[in-house]
Amino acid sequence: MQGQSLQPFPFMKSDTLTADPIYQRIAERVEGLIAGGTFRSGDRLPSVRALSRDWRVSVTTAVGAYSLLEDRGVVEPRPRSGYYVSARRLSPERLPRGNEVESDPVEVGCAEITEKVMDASATPGIVPFGAAVPADEILPSAKLAALYGSVIRSAGPSAHQYSMPPGLPALRFELAKRLLGSGIAVSPDDIIATSGAIDAVLLAVKSVCEAGDVVAVESPTYFGILSMVRELGLKVVEIPVFSDRGLCVEALAEAFASHPVKACILQPNFHNPVGSVMPDAEKRRVVALAKQHGVTLIEDDLYGDLHFSEKRPLSLKAFDSGDTVIHCGSYSKSLAPGLRVGWIVPGSRYHRIKSLKYATSLANATASEMVVAEFLKSGGVERHLRKARRIYARQTHEIREAILERFPGEIRVTRPEGGFLLWCQMPEGFDSEAFALAALKRKISVVPGTLFSASCGLRNCFRISCGFPLDDHSRRAVGILARLAEG
Ligand SMILES: Cc1ncc(COP(=O)(O)O)c(C=O)c1O
């Protein structure tokens, strides 16, 4: 493989316009060659000098590209020898298989241990593999503290008044600019600020559905979505999600043809818990299908900014020239969950959703909106995100490796390209609820698969959060979990 040229593709117009640093583009290209099989596990990669010559960049830039790939666990340096494709990079056959679902609508069940698991995830002293939140060290706490101080001082009492729907203009202005990066071109007046993504999804669902209606949800999906649809008295058809391409569009087409589905709630980018991204072609297909059947798609895109590779995946809304997709998002995973800053792009349901917002939660946290608007305006958010993405890529890789090393050989684990969640699948018969309860006794939280299933299936699966680093303590915890899994 040595001597293989890594010359860039001829520059296209979009390349010359991109503001992404060149080392990221080089890393992307090398990673693409590895993914495509040009370089295999254990292969020596072109030297730093060759890379610098081929790309006409400095040696420092070439080293930067390899360092980025090292952070992602894709390559490893060997002293006095150069960079190699990580020998421990695992083959795709260790990824979870798709799961079976009921084809008829069901009422959402409630796993009995939900409250226990949720309480444990927020309890200090517990190893928090169950909590889908960034570690304290990753939060931009110092920056946020400074911003809170300055905005409160300069805004005076208005920082403590209600921020009524649609939310502060300064925030919506910055959000409109940022949404362009997800492929969504809207004006600030097309956005309503919300208290996080869950508020946005709730408003969207309420604007479309009434009790007794049928909604399509992914299987697995985030348990907050399942609790919501249960509390709203909706029935669900479950649509399988694949780790390599997200929601199964064929199963969705079948559900649309067989049941009176009003809406479909989906996470097209870095899905919780599977980590999948729908390819653009699938996004386009799902929007066309929903349009054809008059079904509203409610997209929850709060992990989309946490991509490990160069580019943010496009939102579903980017493929909607009409009014099929309601887009929802928040800064809970990418900045800090306690900010409670989210948004919705409601399209023609704007006035209905604004009125629902008044009726359900009235207003948002004003100072938080001011802080996020200022953070976005200063460009600091992108800086923070670059760092967070690198950390999550490393943590996710390291924790995945530790699981594969320590757990029984039959385990399958997703390999996400963004976010910080791993979905683990054990053989049929494994009881993830008993496993989670046993883990809690050892002061470790994990979330059993049943919480992610409307019909309380997926008992052989569990979710591990990598919002936290793999230090000695959490490494020991992986060992304990592995022993518990062995039974
Ligand atoms: C898919 C998904 N949607 C919504 C939420 C809640 O987001 P927020 O804190 O912004 O309300 C979460 C939190 O884990 C989530 O994973």
Image (cartoon, rainbow, N blue to C red):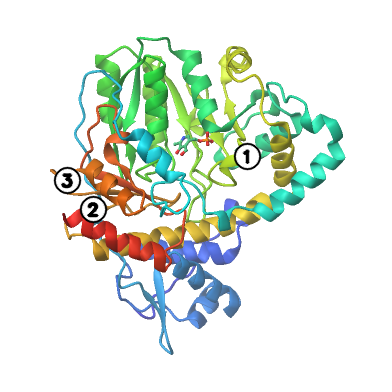
Disc 2 vs disc 1: which is toward the camera?
1
Quick one: which residue is furthest to the front in this view? 441
Query: Where is 208 relative to 462, above or below?
Result: above
Nearest to N terminus: mark 2 or mark 3: 2
Judge the density around disc 1: few (<14), some (14-19), many (≥20) Cα neighbours within 10 Å: some
Please state which amino acid type lies under the numbered disc 2: Arg
Left/right placement of residue 57 relative to residue 87 reads: right
Residue beneath the point at 32% across and 54% down: 442
Quick one: which residue is furthest to the bottom in this view? 80
Nearest to N terminus: mark 1 or mark 3: 1
Residue beneath the point at 82% across and 30% down: 158
Left/right placement of residue 137 relative to residue 122 reads: right
**What residue did someone put label 1 on?**
339
Judge the density around disc 3: few (<14), some (14-19), many (≥20) Cα neighbours within 10 Å: some
**What residue did someone put label 3 on?**
430
**What residue did someone put label 2 on?**
412
**297 or 287: which is nearer to us?**
297
Q: CA distance from mark 1 to mark 3?
A: 38 Å
**Quarter in which the C terminus is drawn:** bottom left
What label sits on residue 76 in the rendered view? Answer: none
Say which element carries label 3: loop
